[in-house]
Image (cartoon, coloured by chain):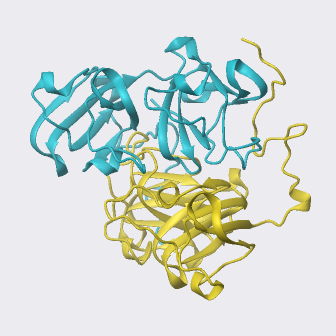
Chain colours: A cyan, B yellow
Amino acid sequence: MNRTNRTYMTHPMVMSGMGMGMGMSPFFKMVVFEQEHFQGKCQEFTSECCNIKDCGFDNIRSIRVECGAWVGYEHIDMEGQQFILERGEYPHWDAYSGNLSYHVERMMSFRPIYCAAHQSSRMMIFEKENFLGRCVELCDDYPSLQAMGWCGTEVGSMHVQCGAFVCYEYPGYRGQQYIMECERHSGDYQRWKNWGSHCQTPKIQSIRRIHH
Amino acid sequence: MNRTNRTYMTHPMVMSGMGMGMGMSPFFKMVVFEQEHFQGKCQEFTSECCNIKDCGFDNIRSIRVECGAWVGYEHIDMEGQQFILERGEYPHWDAYSGNLSYHVERMMSFRPIYCAAHQSSRMMIFEKENFLGRCVELCDDYPSLQAMGWCGTEVGSMHVQCGAFVCYEYPGYRGQQYIMECERHSGDYQRWKNWGSHCQTPKIQSIRRIHH
């Protein structure tokens, strides 16, 4: 096996000829396309959009995220199902929409997510509503809360102390997604109905930090 | 905000009254059900199953993973699409199948995944086939390879030095999944056609370690 140009990957990776040129780029940048595979009408965004129809789009079918982390929503005004969007290419709706029994084929609004430095992200999860019952502090990524010792498939309430996290309905970062941020609601999510306008259950089985 | 019983979550979490009792449990344990929501015929497994029909199942529609990490396959004899299964509950097929334009509603075989200690998991990704071109060493979880500095949406070849990883087609751990293991093929994956019998493209945009 030839191993050339070996480099260790860090956060972020710094490599000759492969840097992102962050100093010259806007902190948030996303390009949306009306057709799949980055075709048709397109527009670049560097800040939130509350209604894609106001920008002349009927639908968004592919996305290229160039800087920062974003959250997309099923409905206008940041309502309905949420989809985390990180740097990379999403050539069709099911690349970003998550795997859901209730399939959503549209994204009507979106906004940037303001994260803390990755290493300082920190949140608490509680067994019961209103920050009661057993609790643990999370400061890493957890593809299975149960494997890490959590007592069941549900979470009663959460408090984000620093940064932003994605919580998922099923293990392995699958199913419904809920974006939890220190910068919103003072980081307090007292009960599952506060996790998002679409939330139907308190099921949470995996949680991870959101990177810049 | 009341914060009771505050504990830091580690790998694995150790908490009074919440331990997993690993000393008494088998290292791998999974219960499969013929109907959704853990109903109907069920069977417990502690090792691989090459064909669920040989165990009297026509289909598997819900899964409870109680110990260890597993990989499920679309076809018998560990062929076709792969699905990582970690500790927790999967009440219906789209909870474990991933979000795919080509939906798979069955899992016909499965096996345990042997992982290294989480902190020592390590792999290399290469820009080109046969371990050529730019390369980086990965020893963490990467929801967006591009955000970490990788040069595009594709990976040419991979070598797993220690442990096991899941590679995903899209950012944020979405899309097609490929399980990459040190224990298989000497950890060498020379080209994208070796990633799995179902693999159609060299697209890889997120990678994470598999925990015990």
| Residue A29 is at least partly visible in this image | yes
Looking at the picture, tell me which residue is in the foreground, A174 or B9.
A174
How far across and down, in percent of the image, does residue B115 sit? Answer: 68, 63
Residue at 40% across, 39% down: B147
Q: Is residue B34 left or right of residue A4?
A: right
Up the image or down, A74 lies above or below B172; here it is: above
Q: Which quadrant holds residue B127? A: bottom left
Q: Is residue A22 left or right of residue A210?
A: left
Looking at the picture, tell me which residue is in the foreground, A10 or A211.
A211
Up the image or down, B159 lies above or below A34; here it is: below
- Residue at the farthest front position: B40
How far across and down, in percent of the image, does residue A102 sit? Answer: 39, 47
Query: Number of numbered discs present?
Result: 0
Q: Is residue A141 left or right of residue A108?
A: right
Image quadrant occupied by the C terminus of chain A: top left
Up the image or down, B48 lies above or below A181; here it is: below
Looking at the picture, tell me which residue is in the foreground, B78 or A196.
A196
Q: Which quadrant holds residue B132? A: bottom left
How far across and down, in percent of the image, does residue B168 sit? Answer: 43, 56
| Residue B163 is at least partly visible in this image | no
Residue at 33% across, 50% down: A95
Looking at the picture, tell me which residue is in the foreground, B136 or B69.
B69
How far across and down, in percent of the image, does residue A3 sit? Answer: 47, 65
Residue at 34% across, 23% down: A78
